[in-house]
Image (tube, helix red, strand yellow):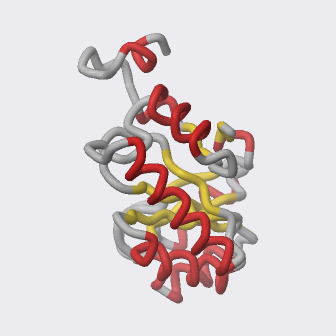
Amino acid sequence: SLMPTHHLLAGFTLGCSCDRPGSSEQGIAENARSGCRVVVADVDLLMCDALVETCRAHSLLFVVECCAQTAEDAVPALRRAKRLGALCVSVHAGAATMTAGEAGELADALLDVAGRERVRLLFRTCRGCIMQDLGRASELCERVPRLRVALAPAHYGADAGLPAPTRAL
């Protein structure tokens, strides 16, 4: 159930606003010339039509990012991803403080909404969400067999405060 995102295609992340370095027409063009084929951006940033058109002019594909505490929170990102023809939505789901049962229910609900919208949904691995550590991610994959994870081991880091399964990285 773990799906390394670096196996998709070479990509880059846009800045936080349309006027940030890397989000300009020149920055996007430079990334495209360097071999990037995928642009990863927060759903709010992808509401900027000029930015989307610049990316399309360079034949870039989209991965939409969002945060969701509930399934309903993900709906705008899923709908925008569908309109953009995005590869998928990468969601930072829930909170690390959720119980395994709550996290499983949220994951199921998010997958149901994504299925209705017909958009591929990946769960980001990072601290502060239901994928807080590799042990939790593994447990959720067992609990929710249809779960797919956008594995980014660097999001866990080598922090001594993390649980043992993550420190083994």
Q: Position of residue 148 (x, y in %)?
A: 64, 48
Q: Position of residue 12 (x, y in %)?
A: 56, 53
Image: 128 above or below 157: below
Q: Where, by quadrant of the figure, is residue 151 drawn?
A: top right
Residue at the image point whose x is 66% and y is 59% from the top: 38
Image quarter where the N terminus lies is top right
Q: Nearer the viewer, residue 30 or 85?
A: 85
Residue at the image point whose x is 43% and y is 20% from the top: 166
In the image, taking residue 21 as reference, residue 145 lies left or right, namely right
Q: Kindly give the residue lying farthest to the front in the view shown.
A: 101
In the image, taking residue 86 as reference, residue 66 lies left or right, namely left
Q: Is residue 54 visible?
A: yes
In the image, taking residue 106 as reference, residue 152 lies left or right, namely right
Q: Nearer the viewer, residue 106 or 91?
A: 106
Q: Where, by quadrant of the figure, is residue 83 drawn?
A: bottom right
Residue at the image point whose x is 40% and y is 46% from the top: 130
Q: Position of residue 81 (x, y in %)?
A: 61, 76
Q: Is residue 29 visible?
A: no
Residue at the image point whose x is 46% and y is 61% from the top: 22
